[in-house]
Amino acid sequence: MRSALLLIILCPSGAAAQAVAYECEALPEIAGWQIVQIWCDPKLWLDQGRFFQHVELCPGYPPPGGQQAAYRRSLDAFLGVPTFFFEFRVQTDADRSELPWGGGCVISAGGTGAAAYICEMARDKAEFWRSNLLPVIEVDIAPDVPHTYRVELYGTESYIWYIDGQLQDSGAPQGPYPSSSPTMVWRAKAAWQANTTQWDYIRYGLIPADASGDYDSDGDVDEGDLYFFSECLLGEGVPSGPGCRFADFDVDGDTDCDDWAAFAAHWTGPPAVPPMPPACAAVGDTNCDGAVNVLDINPFVMALSDPSVYAAKFPNCPIATADANGDGEVDILDINALVAILSGR
C-alpha cells in the first residue's frame, strides 16, 4: 500500500493543492523538494520507507560548521487557506547539546510574515519556536524511538503543537500562516558531534474536516484517503490522535471497525469500496453483510473449495472470515466451527 502512495496529493485539475505527503519512498529531490544545501558530503540514503541523513564534522572546517543536508518547498499554494497543518515522524540520535548550534534535525514553516513555526529535535529533547522574542517551549522526549510531531494552525485564532498525539503547547498566533512567501524547510546538521536522523514522513496542508474520511480535502473519499485511514485504524480503545479526527466518525477518540463501516459508506471511489480490513471482518460472516447466518453457508463452501472464485465473488470480504476455528487456515477443520458459530455455540 505504502509504495503505491503518491508523494504529492492534489485536488482535481484546476483546484489548489490541499495536501502534500512525502512518505520517504524516494529521495527528497526526486519527490519535488528543492535542495537548499548539501554541505561536505553527508551520507544520505533510503531504507524501508525512511530517509536517513548521517552527518559528521567537516574536515578543514571548525565546529559548529559540520556536514548538513537541507531541503525546501514553497507553500504558496496554501496562501489564504483557513486552516493548515504540518506533521512529521522522525528519530535522531543527536545530543541535546547540538540544539543551540543548529545541530540535530529541524523543520521550519516560515517566510517573511509575522508568524513562523520551528521544531528542533535531539535524541531526548524537542523544542518549539514561534519567534525569537517569545519563550522556547522545551519538552523531554523518550530517546531512541521515532516520534510524531504535529502543528495545527487556525488562522489568527490559535496554534496547537502535539507530540505523539499529546498536547504540548497552544495559544494565539502572531498572525496567519501561510502568508508572505511561506516555505517549508527541513534539515539535519552536525554542529559539534556526528548524528543520524531518520525521517518517516513529512505531510502538510489543509486540516481535513472532522469525521469526513477526506484526508486530502479534495471533496471525495477514495484511494487518496485510504492509506491514511488505514494508518489510523488502530482499533477500539486505542487513541488514534489528532491527525486521525477525519477518520473518527463516531468521535470517540479511536479509529475502529465502526469507523471503517462509516468510511466505506462515504466511499466515492473509483474503484469499488476496498476490501474490509481483516481485523474488522467477523468470523463466520463470509458474505460480509454484517450478520452471521445461513446466508454465509454458500460463501463459506466457495471459500473452502475455490478461494479465487470466492475472492472474485466477494472482493470486499477477506477470506479470513471463513477461518472459523482461528488456526490461520481455511480448510475442512473449519466446518464444525462454523456450524457452532451458526448455532450460537
Image: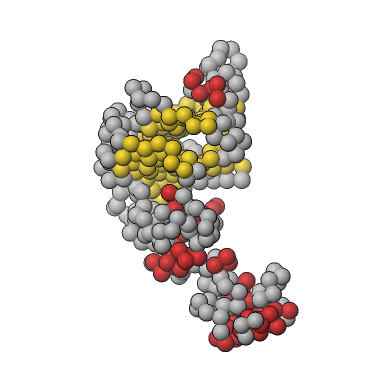
**Within the image, what quadrant is residue 170 found in?**
top left
Where residue 144 appears, as percent x and y from the top left, is 62, 36
**Which of 283 and 90 lies nearest the eye of the viewer?**
283
Where residue 333 appears, as percent x and y from the top left, is 73, 79
Q: In the figure, is residue 303 to the left or right of 177?
A: right
Q: Residue at x 34, y 22 (%)?
A: 133
Quarter of the picture containing the C terminus is: bottom right
Quarter of the picture containing the N terminus is: bottom right
Where residue 91 appears, as percent x and y from the top left, is 56, 36
Q: Residue at x 56, y 70 (%)?
A: 281
Q: Residue at x 55, y 25 (%)?
A: 96
Q: Looking at the picture, does residue 157 appear above or below residue 334?
A: above
**Within the image, what quadrant is residue 179 found in?**
top left
Tally of numbered discs: 0
Q: Looking at the picture, does residue 84 appear above or below residue 174?
A: below
Would residue 209 be visible to someone looking at this image? yes
Q: In the figure, is residue 18 to the left or right of 334?
A: left
